[in-house]
Image (cartoon, coloured by chain):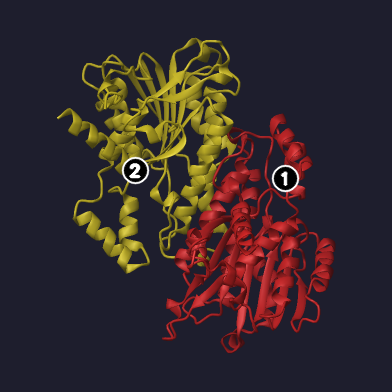
Chain colours: A yellow, B red
Amino acid sequence: MSDCSCQREDQIKSPWENSNCNVVVTGASRGFGRAFCLKLTEALTKEPGAARSINMLLMARDLEALNQTKDQVVTSKAPKSPTKVNVLISRPGLDMVNISEPAARAALQPLFDLNPKDQLEKETQWNLLVHNAATIGSVVLRADERTSIASLENYYRANLLAPMIITGVFLSHFAPFGSNHPPLMVVNVSSLFAMQTCPFMSDYCVGKAARHMYLKTLSTDRPTVAVFNYSPGPLDTDMFNELMLDHADPNRRAWAENLKKSGGVLIPDESARICVSWLRRCHYNNSGDGDAMKLRPESVVCPIHQKEYMDIWTGTNLDYFDALAIEQALNKQLA
Amino acid sequence: MSDCSCQREDQIKSPWENSNCNVVVTGASRGFGRAFCLKLTEALTKEPGAARSINMLLMARDLEALNQTKDQVVTSKAPKSPTKVNVLISRPGLDMVNISEPAARAALQPLFDLNPKDQLEKETQWNLLVHNAATIGSVVLRADERTSIASLENYYRANLLAPMIITGVFLSHFAPFGSNHPPLMVVNVSSLFAMQTCPFMSDYCVGKAARHMYLKTLSTDRPTVAVFNYSPGPLDTDMFNELMLDHADPNRRAWAENLKKSGGVLIPDESARICVSWLRRCHYNNSGDGDAMKLRPESVVCPIHQKEYMDIWTGTNLDYFDALAIEQALNKQLA
C-alpha cells in the first residue's frame, strides 16, 4: 500500500485557491441543486486553499425559492473566510422548455457583465457550470405510448438541448476555443438510469443517456475543459416523491416507499458533499510551453484506490455509492 | 466443444416459417436500408422455412429511389419461392423532421389496411419494424458550437423522436399491449458511436446513444417484443462519403479515405446479410398457459460461441465485426 496517496489528499492545493470563481447552477431552487450550492460555497470559502471570490449565478423558474437558496448560500460561507461571495439570480427565471441561444445568453449575461472578456486572461479564475435542472418525464406511460410530439419535444428541450446550448454559450465567454482560458469544469447531474432502464421511465432513461454522451463528446471536442458526470444516488427530493407516488407500477411505488422508510434515500446535502469533494481532484497539466490547446485537466486520484477514475474529467461516470465506498476505505485506513 | 450448437443453426425452424410477414423499413431508398430489404426478402422467401407472404412497406423522402428499391426487392425473391411478396411505398414520402403521431399513422396506414385488427389473432404472423433512417448531423461543429435550437430540434426529431413515435404507432396496431400478439421485432441500426465519441460528431454520437437506450426501455416496457440494436460497421454509403469529404478534422478525413482505399469500408449488402442472419435466432418462448404477458422472445444462440448474446433481444448491441468473428469461427470449425 506504499503507493496509496489517499491520506495525502488534504495536502493537495485546491484548484480554486486564490482564484476568482464564476459558478452557474441550474435547478438551484431546491433539492440537489440547492444543496450543491451550499456545499460548494462551504468548500470554496474554507481555508487553506480558499477562493479569492465567488460569483454564483442561480437559475430556476421559481424566483422566490431561488432567493431562499441565495440567503442560505450567504450563510454557508466558512466562518471568518476571506472569500468575497456574490450571489446572482437569473431574472426572469429561465424556463428550459423555451431554451434558445439568445435566451441562454440573456440568462448568463449578469455573470458575463462581471467578467469582461478582455479581463479574462489577466485574472486567476476557476469557473464551473453545473447542469442540475432536470424533469422526470412520464412515470406512467410505456416507451411505446410516448407518441405525443409536443410532449416529447418539451422533454428533450428541457433535459437535453438546454444543457447543450447553455454549455455552448458559457464556454464561448469563459473558454473561447483556442484561447489560453482559465480552468473550466462542466458538471452533469446524471443517474444510474443513464446506464440501465427503469419501467415506465423512458423519458428519464433516454434523456440521461443522451446527456451523459453529450458531456463525453464535449470532452472530446474541447479537451481543455473538464467534464464530470456524477450520479447522485436516490435523493429525498420532489422528484423521488413523484416516483414514489405516481409511478405506474405498484411494485416500484412500494419499493420507493420502503427505501424511504428504511433510510435508504439520501439527503441531498450528503450526496452534494461527496460531489463537491471530488471537484478538488481536478488540476491542470500546464506544460508551460504556452500552447493553450495542450492543456489537459488531470485527475489527482490515488493510484491504488481510485485508479478507475484516472480519466474522470472526460465524462466517466462517478456514482455516489462508489465514491462513498472509496471514502469509507480511506477512513478505515486512517482509523 | 460438445455443447457447441453452431453447426445445428440451419436446422432451427425460422421464426417466419409459413407466416404472413409485415415489414417496415425506414430510409429504404439507399445504402443499408435498401440492402437490408433485399437480403431480408432473400431470407424470408427461401425454402426451407419460407414465409407465406410478405407485405413490405418502404419509407423515405425520395420516392423515385424507393421505386428502384421496390423493383430490386421483387427480383431478390428466391427462385421458385412460394412466398407472395407485396411491396408498398409510403406516399407522400415521410420526412422524419415533420414527424407526429398522425403523420406516422398516415405513413403506416397502407400496411394497417392490409391487416384489419380483428384478423390479427387468427393469422400466423411475423412482423418487423426497422429503424434505419438517420442523418449524420454536423461534422464540422464542436459540441460547444451546437447552439442553434432549430437545427438541434430538427436533428433529434428525425433521429430520435421519429423512431419513438413510429414504434408506438406500429406496436399499437400489430402488438396491442396485453394482447396475445404475433411475434414482433424492432431493429435499430445503431453505431459504435452510440458507445464512444468521435470529434465534431456530437449530433451523431448523442442521437445514437439516445436511440440505443430508447430500444432498451422499449424492451423493459414491452418484454413480449424483441428489440435488436445492430451496429453495421463502416459502410460504403452516402453518409460515409459525407464524413470522408466534409469532416472538420483533416486527419479524420484522411483516415476515412485510407479506410475506403484499403477496402476497409463494407458494402452494405455484406453487413445486411449478417444482420438478417441473426433475425433467424429469435424465437418465442410459449409457455402455452395462454398468458400473453408471459411470452418472451428468446435467443437461439450457441452456448459456447455466442453466450454473450443470450439476451440479445432486449437491446444488447451486436456489432458487425463481432458477428463476423463468430461466423468465421464456425466456418473454421466446419472446414
- Element type at marker 1? loop
Q: Which residue is mark 1?
A: B264
Circle 2 SS class: loop
- Taking the spot 30% from the left edge, 35% from the top edge, the residue there is A274
Q: Is residue A333 left or right of residue B22?
A: left
> Can you give x and y, in whole percent of width and height, for residue B80 in the image?
80, 82
Circles 1 and 2 in contact, beta carbons < 8 Å: no
Quadrant in which the N terminus of chain A appears: top left
Query: Residue B8: x and y, percent?
Result: 58, 72
- Residue A204 is left or right of residue A291, and the answer is left
Q: Chain of mark 1?
A: B
Q: Please give left or right for residue A188 compared with residue B250 in the image.
A: left
Q: Quadrant of residue A307?
A: top left
Q: Residues within 10 Å of mark 1 (few under 14, many from 20)?
A: some
For the C terminus of chain A, which image quadrant? top left
Q: Is residue B46 above or below residue B246?
A: below
Check the image and name the residue furthest to the bottom.
B122
Residue bearing the label numbered 2: A232
Q: Amino acid at mark 2?
A: Pro
Can residue B177 be seen here? yes
Q: Nearer the viewer, residue B20 or A110?
A: B20
Q: Residue at x 84, y 65 (%)?
A: B68
Quadrant assignment, res A54: top left
